[in-house]
Amino acid sequence: MPNRIKKLAVLTSGGDSPGMNAAVRAVVRTCAYHGIECYGVYRGYEGMIDGDFQIMDARSVKGIINKGGTILKSARSKRFRTKEGREKAFQQVKEAGIEGLVVIGGDGSFTGAMIFNQEFDFPVMGIPGTIDNDIFGTSHTLGFDTALNTVVDAIDKIRDTASSHNRLFFIEVMGRDVGHIALNTGIAGGAEEILIPEEDLGLDRLVDSLNRSRTSGKTSSIVVVAEGDKIGKNIFELKEYVDQNLEDYDVRVSVLGHMQRGGAPSCFDRVLASRMGVKAVESLLEGKTTYMVGLLNNKMELTPLDNAIKGKTKINLELLRVSDIMST
Ligand code: F6P
């Protein structure tokens, strides 16, 4: 490895996700392994602008692989969207002698990294961290697996009360633009219907489907709704519609919200974070820049940041079909 870089920095940015700490740990320890100094930047790009960073050694990341959230804190920086803010950030890293940056975050964070690279020719590498799994170039983003397990656990619990009262529950899960969480947890939680932004079922078909399930002998039902689903204005409007059109049903709504972003990362996310951290640092040391590390066919691969941001993750049509068959 040519190893011309002597100092790297790592930050977490955008919405946090379980596994971010494990990725920070992996970046710091890979730097230590290769004799590179590593800075942890606090509050994402905000901290970069303010010079809020400190050296981290291998021991400073002990005991965090199992922790949710991010010890580096996260932010969505408005200042970094301005040229002035980015210039300030560049001055700060230059003064500290930092020569490359690992950004753990989603597409907004990657866009910032890409612009920063273009303006200052500064080496950057992305690690996809978001529970939504909406980033192109990886089968799994960090935190997705943990969020799935959290949601399935919640659905199981709601099912207990739903079946005791013969109720229909609409459960809203995260996924601003995509339905990956809804689709997977809907299948795993035995949902009657799964509503995702990628597929507009339509209110009438939803009502027909719920009617069919009642007549087929089902006494309670779960409908998993992705936050970004367009079928109604929101989940409460859906409930209203079903209340008005299906008198037999006693309907309740449960919005799972931010609990989906917390909690200890799953084994899968810890391993993924460790692999991504190693790959990100070693790629920078090999002189590569402006890529995102990702998991493709169980291998660590690099995707140009531009593609990772612009590429669209496709919903798995086979899963949609499985879901339809399972709700028979
Ligand atoms: O991007 C992840 C995500 O969890 C989305 O699914 C959700 O819409 C959003 O973050 C909410 O983020 P915040 O509350 O931090 O603005």
Image: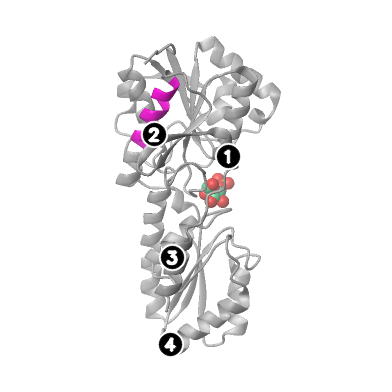
The quarter of the picture where the C terminus appears is bottom left
Q: Which residue is mark 4?
A: 216
Dot 2 lies on which element? Answer: helix
Residue 161 screen position, x and y as percent? 39, 74
280 drawn magenta: yes
- In three-dimensional space, the C-alpha distance between marks 4 and 2, rounded to whole angstroms, equals 47 Å
Q: Are the two marked residues, 4 and 2, in contact with CB atoms closer than 8 angstroms?
A: no
The quarter of the picture where the N terminus appears is top left
Residue 11 screen position, x and y as percent? 48, 29
- Can you see residue 39? no
Residue 250 screen position, x and y as percent? 51, 81
**Residue name at image x 43 percent, y 36 percent:** 70
Of pointers 2 and 3, the one earlier in the residue sequence: 3
Look at the picture and state if 195 lies above or below 268.
Answer: below
Dot 3 lies on which element? Answer: helix
Residue kind at label 1, given as amino acid type: Ile
Is 34 left, or right, of 20 in this rendering? left
Label 1 crowding class (10 Å Cα cut-off): few <14, some 14-19, many 20+?
many
Is 289 left, or right, of 115 in this rendering? left
As drawn, the label of residue 187 is none
- In three-dimensional space, the C-alpha distance between marks 2 and 3, rounded to whole angstroms, equals 28 Å
Secondary structure predominantly adopted by residues drawn in magenta:
helix
Range shown magenta: 273-284
Q: Which residue is mark 3?
A: 186
Label 3 crowding class (10 Å Cα cut-off): few <14, some 14-19, many 20+?
many
Q: Quadrant of residue 309?
A: top right
Q: Which residue is mark 1?
A: 309
**Residue name at image x 58 percent, y 53 percent:** 177
- In three-dimensional space, the C-alpha distance between marks 1 and 4, rounded to whole angstroms, equals 44 Å
Q: Nearer the viewer, mark 1 or mark 4?
A: 1
